[in-house]
Image (cartoon, rainbow, N blue to C red):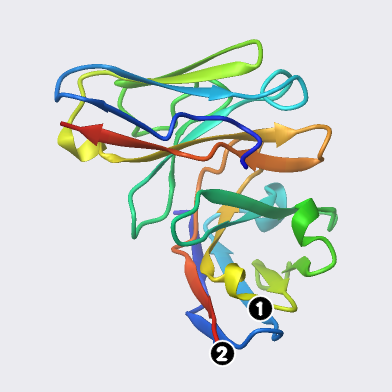
Amino acid sequence: QVQLVQSGPEVKEPGASVKVSCKTSGYTFTTYGLTWVRLAPGQGLEWMGWISPYNGDTYYARKLQGRVTVTTDTSTSTAYIELRSLRSDDTAVYYCARRGSREGFDYWGQGTVVTVSS
Amino acid sequence: QSVLTQPPSVSAAPGQKVTISCSGSSSNVGVNYVSWYQHVPGTAPKLLISENNKRPSGIPDRFSGSKSGTSATLDITGLQTGDEADYYCGTWDSSLSAGVFGGGTKLIVL
């Protein structure tokens, strides 16, 4: 069965970086794109970025450009999102999801809580 | 401010029907498929509707989606208390080259 398993919770100070992983199984990794979405306290879902594990193509949310990088390791079927220069408003639950916005996100990771606090 | 516009909340009694709207523009809803997600706090969001009106396996036919022009709609019939959740529409924006969501709609089953 398809599974997306994310890394554990993170606590970071403002200005630091965080890297969250999403290990997939149960399907051919390079067949589907992967999307990162976050949900901040009291806010709605926010699309962060997308990557094609097949060829490495990426798209990012404009407000995060320059601070975010999404990568994949096809040898381990794992996707990563790195967010730099963290601010308090980056505090959120971060989710990886299979597929893209056009097709709909059919499988989701369990979420990773990232807390940014001094 | 979300790119897609949803009502903040809707409510109805058990057994009744609700409609949640999602308004966009010619660069997103008007030209791309719309998906709908159910989010119960503390859990991962769940895909309810893809490609405007397709239900993934396991989603009851009480949930249905439609799209007309730059607006999309999620209908939920035969409301159950377990349907209480936040509902989001999402699509791709061809001008932004980015995914976009609505602000979410809280469904209250009275």
Label 1 Cα crowd, 10 Å radius (few <14 / some 14-19 / many 20+): some
Is residue B98 something one can see in this rendering? yes
The x and y percentages for residue A78 are 65, 69
The residue at the point 48 percent across, 18 percent down is B73
Q: Which residue is mark 1?
A: A19
Residue situated furthest top in the rendering:
B68
Q: Are the numbered discs 2 and 1 placed on the same chain, yes or no?
A: yes
Local SS, label 2: loop
The residue at the point 43 percent across, 48 percent down is B45
Q: Is residue B71 above or below residue A102?
A: above
Chain ID of residue with mark 2: A
Chain ID of residue with mark 1: A
Q: Which residue is mark 2?
A: A118
- In the shown orientation, is residue B86 left or right of residue A67? left
In this rendered view, identify the residue nearer to me: A23 or B72: B72
The x and y percentages for residue B83 are 25, 36
Q: Quadrant of residue A118?
A: bottom right
Q: Quadrant of residue A51?
A: bottom right
Label 2 Cα crowd, 10 Å radius (few <14 / some 14-19 / many 20+): few
The residue at the point 30 percent across, 27 percent down is B60
Q: Are marks 2 and 1 in contact (CB under 8 Å)?
A: no
As measured in the structure, the alpha-carbon distance from the residue carrying label 2 to the one carrying label 1 is 18 Å
Q: Nearer the viewer, mark 2 or mark 1?
A: 2
Is residue A52 something one can see in this rendering? no
The residue at the point 52 percent across, 43 percent down is A106
Q: Is residue A86 above or below residue B72?
A: below
In this rendered view, identify the residue nearer to me: B72 or A91: A91
